[in-house]
Amino acid sequence: MAMAVRMAPLRPQPDCAMPMPPPPTARNSAPDALVEGLRRLLQASTGRAVQRLETHISWVLLDGEHAWKIKKPVRLGFLDFTSLQTRHQACDDELRLNRRLAAGIYLDVLPIRGSAAMPVLDGAGEPIEYVLRMKQFAPGALLSEKLAAGTLVPTAIDRLAARLAAFHRDAPAAGNAAPYGNAPQVLAQTALVLDGLESSPGAGRLPDLRAWCEAEGRRLAPCFAARRRQGWVREGHGDL
């Protein structure tokens, strides 16, 4: 059962991203120009208008049949996409992880070649970027649209809940050697997120928030350890 999730056009916030030098391993030094170049290419090849959406870490192009997602070369507290290699790996990971719930939507990862102004999706040459290709949701397929139209029935929610419960039940558990889910790792990830907020308007509250997170991390450390021992640290989905 595939889940339709709305992708809102968000602009990157300055209180999240840190100053970033040009990616040393990527030949594309103008990512915005590349996105526009790909949009023109898709419009020419499909004969349809292509809509551009934006999140804090990706650009998405909707051509009426497919959705094309390009990772932004950004460094945030919880990720680093500043190299072509890490963006390629992120696309591959997203394809693998999301196919577990939506195999018919997540199709493949393609190299982009050519130049930022004139990108191509086939041919020879060194890749300058990678794009994740997905099927675009049909009009009216989003849960929010079904709810607004009055067509979202309780049995559909029951099926969704059962599907998600089975997904979490069957997800692979992290082994004892995996770094995930222990108190130091959780606190380290939390600290990285808070580091990205140092220039935000509410930064004056960060010392108290850091102290609270550290105290709670120490208090909950036995719970984190128990969850790992019992196999409840699993390869799930960050948006769930």
Image (cartoon, rainbow, N blue to C red):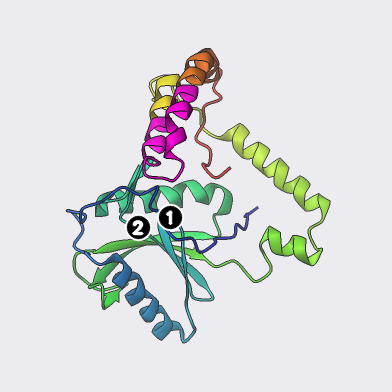
Q: Which residues are magenta?
A: 189-213
Q: Tell whether label 1 touches label 2 (CB within 8 Å).
A: yes
Residue 182 lies in quadrant: top left
Residue that appears at 65% across and 37% down: 166
Q: Quadrant of the C terminus?
A: top right
10 Å neighbourhood of mark 1: few (<14), some, or many (≥20)?
Answer: some
Mark 2: which amino acid? Lys
Nearer to me, 17 or 124:
17
Q: Nearer the viewer, residue 186 or 138?
A: 186
Q: Main secondary structure of the magenta part?
A: helix
Q: In the image, is residue 175 part of the stretch drawn in magenta?
A: no
Closer mark to the observer between disc 2 and disc 1: 1
**Relative to 159, is 173 above or below?**
above
> Which of the two discs, 2 and 1, labels the residue nearer the N terminus?
1
Left or right: 129 as drawn, with respect to 1 = left
Q: Which residue position holds label 2?
A: 72
According to the picture, the residue beneath numbered tag 1 turns out to be 56
